[in-house]
Amino acid sequence: MKKIFILSAVVASAMFAANAQAIDSTGCGLGSMAWRGQSGPVPQILAVTTNGSFGTQTFGITFGTSGCDPNGRVSGGTQKMVFNFLENNMEQYALDAARGEGETLDTIAGMLNMDKQEFAKKSQQNFAAIFPDSNVDAIFVTNKIFEIIKA
């Protein structure tokens, strides 16, 4: 019985998704950020499932993170997206930047539409400028990243 219910839900979702014409029908949230730029039903389903399963969309809308705006609009601007990402991933970004490789570097490079290796190299080379002490915040790090990539 459960299998029939799940199969019915998947088929119904697919039928409704086939007629969707929105550019970004997944909204904001971690899932939307993770599969941003990809098209087709599979990435959309994965994004929506991630957003719904972990409550990242609700959290993002409430607190203005994960590409969300508390006013209910998907926030725009690359700098704000990077800032929102760093608010939740600062420690991991610091570790990855020190090593010169890692998922946070790849994610931010994707947001910036940069070559992953080039961004990783710049992050590692400028680690001391990005993290001059252990008390830096996401605003400082975001501004330093944009300063470094523009140089």
Image: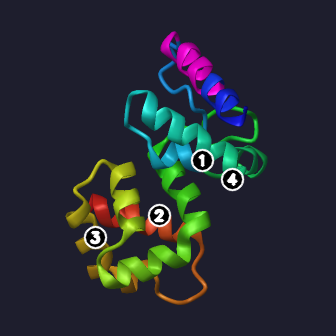
Reading the image, the residue beneath label 2 is: 143
Q: Is residue 113 above or below residue 89?
A: above
Circle number at residue 95? none
Q: Which mark is first along the chain, 2 or 4? A: 4
Q: In this view, does 111 lie above or below 28?
A: below
Circle number at residue 120? 3
Circle number at residue 50? 1
Q: Which mark is first along the chain, 1 or 2? A: 1
Label 3: which secondary element = helix
The residues bearing labels 1 and 3 have C-alpha atoms spaced at a distance of 26 Å
Instruction: Residue 15: say if magenta.
Output: yes
Identity of the residue drawn at 57% across and 20% down: 11
Q: Give the range drawn in magenta.
A: 9-19
The residues bearing labels 2 and 1 have C-alpha atoms spaced at a distance of 29 Å
The residues bearing labels 2 and 3 have C-alpha atoms spaced at a distance of 17 Å
For label 3, the crowd category at 10 Å Cα-Cα, with few meaning under 14, some 14 to 19 and many 20 or more, is many
Q: Which mark is first along the chain, 3 or 4? A: 4
Q: In this orientation, does residue 112 appear?
A: yes
The residues bearing labels 4 and 3 have C-alpha atoms spaced at a distance of 28 Å
